[in-house]
Amino acid sequence: MANLPPQLSAEHATFSTANHDVHRMRRNALAKYFSRAQVSRLEPTVRDLAESLCNKILVVGKGAPFDLTTAYSLFTTDVISGYCLGENLGLIAQKGWKPNFREPLYAQLRLVYLFRFIPFLKHAGVAMAA
C-alpha cells in the first residue's frame, strides 16, 4: 500500500501504512485471526448464516423484488460482526432488509474520491471528528 498517494493514505491505519516494517508488525498482530484453523472454526457459523439467508430469500422473494446486494450485505455484516464481537447483529433474522450498513458504508467510501482531488477535505474531516 506504499504506492498510495498521500491524500489517500492514513498514517495510523493498518492497511495503508507506508513504512514496510510498521505494516509487517501490524499485519503480524492480525495474522492469528485469519489463520487456517481460525477460519475453519468459523465455517459452521458461515454455513448456518448462509442457510438462513437462503431461507429468507426464498420467503421474501415470493413478494416484491429486492436488491440481492442488500441481502449479501446483511450476510456479510452478520458474519463479520459475529466473528469480531462474538455475537452477530442478527440482520438476517430481522423481518426486512433494513437496517443495513451498505449504504452508509458506500457513502463513506465515496469520500475517498473527494480526498484524492481535494486533499484538504481529509484533514478537515479528521479535525471535525476529533
Image (tube, rainbow, N blue to C red):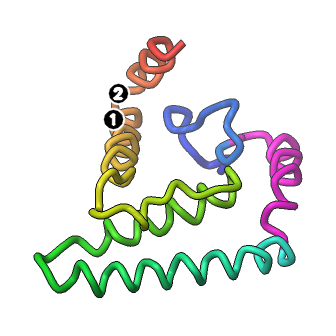
Residue drawn at x 53%, y 76% is 49
- Name the secondary structure under disc 2: loop
Q: Which residue is label 1 attached to?
A: 114
Q: Which residues are magenta?
A: 17-35
Query: Please, what is the three-letter code of the amino acid marked with disc 1?
Result: Leu
**Crowdedness near tag 2: few (<14), some (14–19) or many (≥20) residues, C-alpha within 10 Å:** few
Q: Main secondary structure of the magenta part?
A: helix
Q: Using the rendered view, name the quadrant where residue 83 is placed.
A: bottom right
Q: Which mark is residue 27?
A: none
Confirm whether the magenta stretch covers residue 30: yes
Q: Which residue is label 2 attached to?
A: 118
- In front of the other: 49 or 67: 49
- In front of the other: 89 or 68: 89
- Relative vertical location of residue 79 with respect to residue 4 in this rendering, above or below: below
- In front of the other: 96 or 14: 96
- Relative vertical location of residue 118 with respect to residue 27 in this rendering, above or below: above
Residue drawn at x 58%, y 65% is 79
Q: Using the rendered view, name the quadrant where residue 11 is placed.
A: top right
Query: Please, what is the three-letter code of the amino acid marked with disc 2?
Result: Ile
Where does the image place residue 127, in percent across and percent down from the top left? 49, 12
